[in-house]
């Protein structure tokens, strides 16, 4: 069993990878939408645990105080990541979304306003999704196909709407607690200590100044790279498993 955090709640779940092994067996997949299509409508909390890959994810940006510096640190270690962007911030700072895409990172949706979308009507929720899609496409010419609900709050009604639009809902297996811990050292220690292959790591490049996150990221990449981990987008994490096929 593993202990994970969703939003600010901690729960325990067992051997999710067994489910992935069954659901992802099948034709080769070229994108995260194809690789995870059997799981559309099912929140994803962890990736396949083979290959020593980890998916770093950053929420709440883009933010000029943080995003360009995080991109610099990622480039220093040739690491790729997935950015769950907030649509209204994309409209304010589209250049950082373009920079991320050009550097080979993945862009995913974190709603347009970062309000509690679980409490919105269907029409309001659809507007949050569509506006973010349009903002990302205008900024960088791509459309997100993964969604992370603000605060990790998701319900069956949201899942049905997202499945109809072929979105995969991605939560996380390892919370860096960079929104809570007081120092870069504490953040780095937590991630380095608990990281396992297939982890989806929650970090932030928005929501206020993140100097501790930026400093911790350098330490995390340095030490985990030395341990043989590689840092990939969600697309790469699940596509690698799909391409390997069953029994490999």
Image: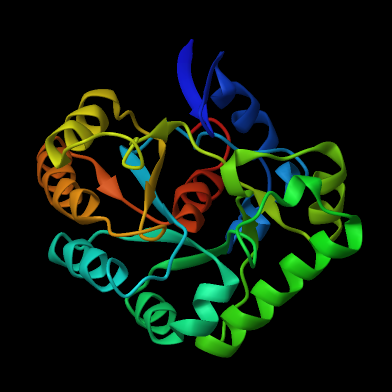
Q: How is the model colour-coded?
A: rainbow
Q: Nearer the viewer, residue 213 or 103?
A: 213
Please tell me which residue is depicted at 51% across the width and 57% down the height of the picture.
Answer: 235
Q: Nearer the viewer, residue 234 or 201?
A: 201
Q: Name the outermost residue toward the top.
A: 1
Q: Is residue 65 above or below residue 122?
A: below
Question: What number of labels is visible?
Answer: 0
Q: Position of residue 80 (x, y in %)?
A: 32, 60
- Residue 177 horizontal side relative to residue 211, left or right: right
- Residue 30 horizontal side relative to residue 76, left or right: right
- Residue 9 horizontal side relative to residue 22, left or right: left
Q: Is residue 72 above or below residue 180?
A: below
Q: Position of residue 216 (x, y in %)?
A: 17, 46
Q: Position of residue 204 (x, y in %)?
A: 37, 52
Q: Nearer the viewer, residue 85 or 173?
A: 85
Please tell me which residue is depicted at 80% across the width and 60% down the height of the picture.
Answer: 125
Please tell me which residue is depicted at 73% across the width and 66% down the height of the picture.
Answer: 129
Q: Nearer the viewer, residue 244 or 188?
A: 188
- Residue 131 horizontal side relative to residue 144, left or right: right
Q: Quadrant of residue 210?
A: bottom left
């Amino acid at each position: 069993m593993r202990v994970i955090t969703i939003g600010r709640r901690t729960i325990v779940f067992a051997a999710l990878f067994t489910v992935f092994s069954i659901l992802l067996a099948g034709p080769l997949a070229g994108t995260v939408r194809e690789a995870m299509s059997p799981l559309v409508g099912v929140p994803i909390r962890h990736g396949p645990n083979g290959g020593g890959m980890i998916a770093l994810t950053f929420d709440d940006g883009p933010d000029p105080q943080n995003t360009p510096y995080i991109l610099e640190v990622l480039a220093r270690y040739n690491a790729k990541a997935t950015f769950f962007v907030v649509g209204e911030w994309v409209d304010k700072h589209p250049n950082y979304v373009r920079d991320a895409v050009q550097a080979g990172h993945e862009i995913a949706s974190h709603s347009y306003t970062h309000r509690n979308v679980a409490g919105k009507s269907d029409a309001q929720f659809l507007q949050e999704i569509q506006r973010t899609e349009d903002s990302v496409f205008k900024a960088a010419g791509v459309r997100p196909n993964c969604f992370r609900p603000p605060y990790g709050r998701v319900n069956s009604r949201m899942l049905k709407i997202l499945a109809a639009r072929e979105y995969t809902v991605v939560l996380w297996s390892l919370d860096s607690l960079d929104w809570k811990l007081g120092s870069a050292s504490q953040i780095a220690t937590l991630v380095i200590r608990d990281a396992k292959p297939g982890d989806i790591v929650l970090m932030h490049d928005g929501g206020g100044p993140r100097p501790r996150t930026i400093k911790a990221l350098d330490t995390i990449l340095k030490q985990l790279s030395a341990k043989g981990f590689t840092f990939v987008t969600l697309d790469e994490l699940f596509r690698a498993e799909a391409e390997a096929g069953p029994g490999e």
